[in-house]
Structures are given as C-alpha cells and as structure tokens.
Amino acid sequence: MLRSAPGLRCVPEGAGATVLSGHRLVFNKKSTKDNSGKANVEPCVNSYVWGVLYAISDADLHRLDEGEMGYRRVQSHVQRQDGASIDAWLYVASLPDSDPALRPYFWYKRFLVEGAREHSLPAEFSLSIGCELKI
C-alpha cells in the first residue's frame, strides 16, 4: 500500500485484528511488472480473511486509488477484534485472473506474513499464506 503512494499518511485504527467474513485470500491478480500473483480477496462461504484497519484521510485515499493499479476500491462490512462491525474500504482486483498456474513469489508472501506478525494477526492466517504454492 505505501509503495504505491509514497508519503501516504495512514495509521492502524485501534488495536488488534480485523476480519472480513465470507471471503478468502487468493493470489489471482496478475502483476503487470513481473507476471506473478498478487493478493486479492474473493467471496467464499465459511471463510474469512484477517487484516488491519487503517485510518486514512480522504486526500490520501484518493492518492491510494491512483497508486493501486489493477485494483478497485469497494466498501464492505468488517468486524474488529472488540466485536464491533463497521464499514471499511478494501481493494479488490479489477480483473482477477483464472490461470491456476498464477503464483506469488516467495518474497511477496513473506512480506504479507511479516505484516501479519507485526500487527499480531492470528498465527493461522500467517500459516495459510505460507502454505500457498510459491514460484
């Protein structure tokens, strides 16, 4: 996120993890730079994706929109660790790729796992990222 919009000001909102229910993490957004799979979420019954909720100003949100090439911003309900359900913006792939051979690079998955650990997301989530096939 910060790589796509240098200088972006965003801070985690509150403490703890946030969960997006009814979705799963996939790597079906094809990178235009290296043709690898990038993170995306897609609807999936009885699944969920852990994440971090950030507070971002409207101006910075528009900068992020411009920087997140190949993604579109959508609003969805998420649940904070304290049980509160709120609306949040998330980015989903504009054109998900159905190629089963599309895979993320190891360094990319490690970047996601390190972020998950930094924000104290459940270990099961980090393990699920690590279980994906790698290039």
Image (cartoon, helix red, strand yellow):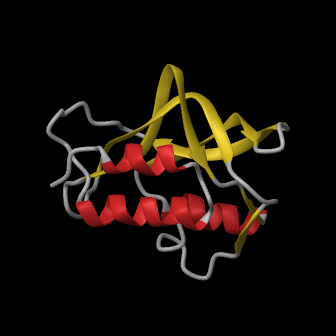
All told, the count of numbered labels is 0
Give the answer, above or below, for where 72 lies relative to 1.
above
Give the answer, above or below, for where 2 lies relative to 86.
below
Seen at 83% across and 43% down, the residue is: 82
Q: Is residue 56 left or right of residue 127?
A: right
Give 8 or 17, whichever is nearer the viewer: 17
Give 72 or 122, whichever is nearer the viewer: 122
Seen at 18% across and 34% down, the residue is: 99
- Percent coordinates x, y for residue 52 in the rendering: 65, 55
Seen at 49% across and 42% down, the residue is: 92
- Percent coordinates x, y for residue 57 in the rendering: 78, 66
- Percent coordinates x, y for residue 133 in the rendering: 21, 45
Quadrant of the rendering where the C terminus is positioned: bottom left
Give the answer, above or below, for where 7 lies relative to 104.
below
Residue most extreme to the front: 123
Q: Quadrant of residue 2?
A: bottom right
Seen at 44% across and 60% down, the residue is: 112
Give the answer, above or below, for where 45 lies relative to 52.
above
Q: Is residue 29 left or right of residue 126?
A: left
- Percent coordinates x, y for residue 64 in the rendering: 59, 63
Q: Is residue 131 left or right of residue 9?
A: left
Residue most extreme to the bottom: 7
Q: Quadrant of residue 75?
A: top right
Q: Is residue 112 left or right of residue 83?
A: left
